[in-house]
């Protein structure tokens, strides 16, 4: 449906949870009027994927990542995801925008020093009190953006998305 509405789409499907529901599942949509250079599953990672695109004469990587549900940033599972994604981001020769279901607050990720390691800046959607309506209603969905373009990026909350409990973020 989304592709028919004029979007390039890449996604990881939701997985069954121990409680009988689903967890995870990320989708990234890019308007088809923008030039798609290459769709990519980040090498050796099942929790990150995205597109390389051409925009105003430059290449940009736009991706998504999903950290392990209910786990802190210091767990071995999430450290592994961050290490793998970090190696990939540091290998890029272009700026990036990563949308993440980080499962943690923006200040928690920033406090690890990892954004600086990957030459990134945390960007939260404007006028946001929460991005996930389950549990405590926290901001756990936000962007990590290359420092070289962070000042040019504006993010906002997309309230009318057909999935839950998370909200979308527009850039």
Image: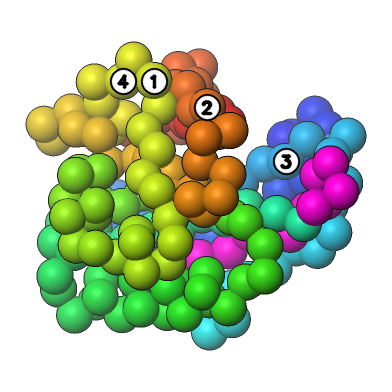
Q: Could you tell me how far apart the alpha carbons at marks 4 and 2 are, in whole angstroms?
A: 13 Å
Q: Could you tell me how far apart the alpha carbons at marks 4 and 3 are, in whole angstroms?
A: 23 Å
Residue 4, image x, y percentages: 83, 34
Is 130 displayed left or right of 52 in the figure? left
Q: Secondary structure at mark 2?
A: loop
> Which residue position holds label 1?
126
Any mark on residue 128, and which?
A: 4
CB within 8 Å, label 1 to label 2:
yes
Lower sequence index among marks 3 and 1: 3
> Which residue position holds label 2?
154
> Which residue position holds label 3?
30
Tell me if mark 3 has few (under 14), some (14-19) or many (20+) residues whose alpha carbon lies within 10 angstroms of its own: some
Which region shows up in magenta? 46-58
> As displayed, is residue 168 above or below residue 23?
above
Q: Residue at x 83, y 32 (%)?
A: 6
Q: Is residue 44 visible?
A: yes
Lower sequence index among marks 4 and 2: 4
């Amino acid at each position: 449906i989304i592709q028919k509405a004029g979007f390039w789409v890449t996604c990881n499907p939701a997985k069954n949870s121990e409680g009988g529901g689903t967890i995870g599942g990320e989708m990234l949509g890019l308007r088809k009027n923008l030039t798609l250079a290459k769709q990519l599953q980040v090498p050796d990672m099942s929790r990150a994927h995205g597109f390389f695109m051409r925009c105003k004469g430059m290449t940009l990587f736009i991706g998504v990542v999903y950290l392990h549900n209910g786990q802190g940033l210091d767990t071995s599972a999430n450290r592994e995801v961050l290490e793998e994604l970090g190696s990939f981001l540091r290998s890029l020769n272009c700026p990036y925008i990563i949308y993440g279901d980080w499962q943690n607050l923006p200040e928690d990720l920033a406090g690890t020093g990892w954004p600086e390691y990957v030459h990134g800046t945390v960007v939260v959607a404007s006028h946001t009190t929460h991005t996930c309506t389950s549990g405590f209603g926290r901001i756990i969905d936000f962007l990590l953006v290359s420092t070289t373009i962070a000042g040019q990026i504006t993010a906002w909350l997309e309230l009318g998305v057909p999935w839950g409990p998370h909200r979308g973020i527009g850039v």
